[in-house]
Every structure is written in structure tokens, then in C-alpha cells.
Amino acid sequence: MAVIHDVMPSFGLYQPASVADALNLLDRHGRDAWILAGGLDSFDWLKDRIKRPKAVVDLSGISELQGIRESGDGLEIGAMTTLTEVVRHPAVRERYSLLLEAAEHAASPQIRNQGTIGGNVSQDTRCWYYRTGWFCYRAGGNICYADTPTAMNREHAILGADRCVAVNPSDTAPALIALDASMVVRSKSGERVVPAEEYFIGPGTDITRMTILQPGDLLTAIRIPGTWGGARFYFEKVRDRNVWDFALVSVASAMSDNGETIERVRIAVNGVAARPLRLRAVEDAVRGKARSEETAKLAGDLAIQGALPLQHNAYKVPLMRNLVKRAIRGAEGA
Amino acid sequence: MEEPIIERGTEEKRPISRRDFIKGVIAAGAVATSASYLFRSTGAMFSQSSAQGSVERLITLNVNGQIRRVDVMNQETLAMTLRYKLGLTGTKLGCDRAECGACTVLIDDVPHYSCSVLTHTVRSRKILTIEGLASPRGELHPIQQAVVDEQGFQCAFCMSGFVMAAVGFLKLNPNPTRSELAHGISGNLCRCQDYNKILTAFMRGAEYMRRA
């Protein structure tokens, strides 16, 4: 990452006051537009001069995108709500501590004070070949520099790679999938509500994007249903250092059990593929079983089926297996 | 040199004529020029014209309780404005990538990395830098006093960022344990590895604040 102590190249700056105005701007500028939320992902791209958008649309002045509201039996979180606001919100603390844990583990205090939940789920991958401007598949080229015999790929994918081996860096994404959240996406042509699981896409779908957002689309809110409020949660993020770092592997699970038997469960991992993965096979296998060491082992072994490590990231396979075990049994059980 | 552009926040508010405003902006430019020896390449960068965008370049900022008028480019970060337009060089630029904390300032009492905030997004907010911590009579803020008393830092390049992060954290958590405080200021790095002394100083500073 080149450190250039200089101002960014110039761009047009637009500061709409409403979602409608923002959508008009995004529509007008199309591919030349860049959505600016907290800016923690954006500024790296702009400062390094890897991305040169003509029109930056700053969402910080749009009040309808901010804050957390009760919605039915769940919550609706405005996309521009900061991670700190998520962590401090009483309803999140009481009923959705899984999301609190995930948000609290992101980056550093100052970044959580500024970074938004919408930005956290929509941020680009941190593959350094891609981030430093190498013309790879994801950047529109025809090679993956992270998947060559001499590549440094300790942080890259073990599952679902398709030419590109980058991983999704979001901490809140697996928690939102486990909570069965949905994403509210608006554009000039209307609004659609998409399950969190389907918001993220892999290279097989579109190698240049991490999410379903197309030019003109704006993530406006995240809805969390009441379904999993107060359930048994598990979140763990393993990283090299305790601040700033992205997950090597993270796991998030929501479970309801009658003391012994697992009745309902959702479990997702991140840091292992280009999108956060919901582990449906694991969910199906453990449902109705005792929350025991045996079940945890079954879950862990099933989770890593099909894993294909690169030169330097084989450690992620047992790491993912053990985190999935813990998600079933708790930290003491694995 | 800075004097003409400062309007004391405590003074009675009076309407600013366009002429006063522009004079203020010109004076702010002079500060930038005088600071540019630190940053030789920026003179040319600052003079580049901005692309088409819809924001007004001449803006008013509330910095350390003072109303500062300044000409800000679309793409300018708050750290750049503070250091090279307003001459407030107490705020340091370490990594310029939200990865070290040296540029931490308070925006509406909340710690932010000023290298990663567009100045145009904080027009209506209250910005506090290390220069604004001491009282108008020159008495150090309790955290600053504690840093002096405990010799909290070695080279101290990271100090202003650390102090601002601690002040922001202590506003909400006035009585932290040592580990809570460590977590609260974990978004700041010290290359001299003085964390132990820094924490000792800030724990003492928290105590001074509670007594004050």
C-alpha cells in the first residue's frame, strides 16, 4: 500500500440531503459515481489513486439513512448508522448481542465511530494485489496474482474460489446472515428487499463486485426480524492483532435449543471465501441433535468439506472447523 | 499572522460580510504558504482547481471554539485543512490511512481520524484539536497535566492523537479500569512502545478529571 502524503486527486463532491436526491445523482453519474459512507474503504482507493471516480456522493447529510428504529417485532438499522451506534443501542444489546459482538470486533474505536454498517457490509475485499492496483481478474484483467506458485496468500480463500481467491472482510456480514437480516436496496426504479445471504456475491456471479449493488443502487437499511431475538448466540473472530485487523476466519451463529436439543440454528462464516458463507449443510445436520461434543465435531467436519487451501493458508481449514465446533458447543466445548 | 482570520467564539455573533469572509480566506491561504516548508509538494496540489461538484469551496468551520473561514477543496481531508490551511500542526499525520491514530481529533466530542474525514462533511460540527484542550488562560487539560507529571511519552509524535482519543473516551467513561482504558484508546499506535507509561499517565489524568 503506497503511502502518498498528499491530497487525493480532485473529484466532484455531491452532498444530497435526501435518498431521492442521492438516487438521482447515482442515476445521472452511473459508473462514474462513487458512494461515500464512512469513507474508511473509499479513502484508501482514492488516496492510492487506484480508483478515480468523477462524482463522489457523500451520504453523511441524509438523516433518513441514520439511526435504529423498532420495526414490527424487529429492528431497522439505517445504512449510515455507525458501528459505535449499533454497539451502544439498547435493543441491539438486549436482543441481538450477536450483532453487537460483530460490530465491536471491527477495526478500531475511531473507525467504529465513523464506519457505518452499510459500508461495513458493502466494502471491497482487502486482497493486497487487488488493492495496490494490480490488473487482476477483479480489476478487469485475466490473472489472479494471489494464486500463483510464489504468491503471498495467507489471508485468502479456502472455499468457493473461482479464478479470484479474495475474501470478504466484513465482520457484521456473518452476524447479519445468522440473524436472517435483509437488505433494503433502492434505485430510481424502486425498492427491493434481499436476504442478507443473497446480498453478497462470489466471483462466479460477478468477479468485479462483492455485492449485488449495481451502479445506481443504494443500500438504505438493514432489517433484522424478531425471529432470533434473544437466541443463543456465538461470535468469534480470529485475527493476527486485536485492533484494526480483518478476520482470518470469523463465525457467527444463532441457535434456539430446549436445553439439550438444537431446535433451530443458523450459522455463517467469513474470511474463507469471496462472500460470507451460510453453512446450510451444517445447519441441516445438527438440527434436532443434542448440543453435544459429538454434534459439534460433526458440524466442524462437515463445514470444511470441499475446502481447497492455497500455498500459505492451509491453517484456515482447521481454524474454520474449530470455530464451527465452538459455534455449536460454545468456547469451552472445543 | 493567524490573528486576522480568528473570530473568537465567545464574542457576540455578528453577521459576516462577504468581503470579511473573503479576506479571512485569503489570510488562511497565507498560513498555508507559511506552513508549506513542511510539505513542499502541497503548494501545487492546493492550487489545483477542483472538478465539477456542487459544494461551495468557501466554508466556515468551528475549530476549538473559534469560527474559522477557509477555502477547502472537495477532496481535502480534515487533517490537511487543520495543518496546512489553519496552521494547527499539533494534529500529526502518521500513516494517512486510518491505521495509526496520530491525527485523532474530536468531532462533536467523538474521536475520529482526521486523515479520513472530508473537511466538507464537518461544516456544521464542533472540531476540537490538541490546541483547543488547554483553558483560555493556559491551564493544561487534566490529561495533558497527567502526561507531564508521569512523563507519559517518549518521542511524543503520537501524543496529540492519543490525548484526543483519551479525552473522547473519558467523556463517556470517566472511571475506567486500566484495561477498559486500553481498549478505549486501542485505535492509536505508539512506535516507541510506551503503552505502559501512556496508560499510567491517562489513568492519573482520569483521576484528575474526576477530582476537578
Image (spheres, coloured by chain):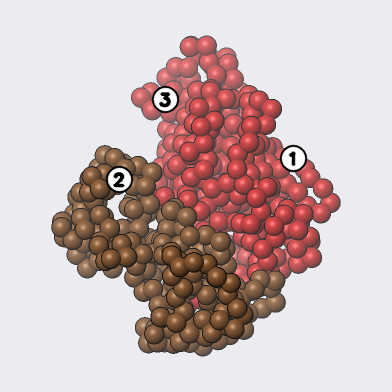
| Residue that numbered label 3 is attached to | A330
State the quadrant of the N terminus of chain B: bottom left
Tag on residue B181? 2
How far is disc 2 from disc 3 in space, using C-alphas?
Answer: 28 Å
SS for tag 1? strand
Disc 3 chain ID = A
* Residue at image point 45% right, 68% down: B11
- Work out whether residue A244 or residue B71 is closer to the camera in this orientation and state it: B71
Q: Nearer the viewer, mark 3 or mark 1?
A: 1
Residue ID for mark 1:
A193
Task: Give the chain of mark 2.
Answer: B
* Vertical order, A264 against A27 (above or below): above
> What amino acid does circle 1 point to?
Val
At which x and y percent is residue A264? 59, 20
**Chain letter for the brown part:** B
Please tell me which residue is depicted at 73% across the width and 46% down the height of the picture: A185
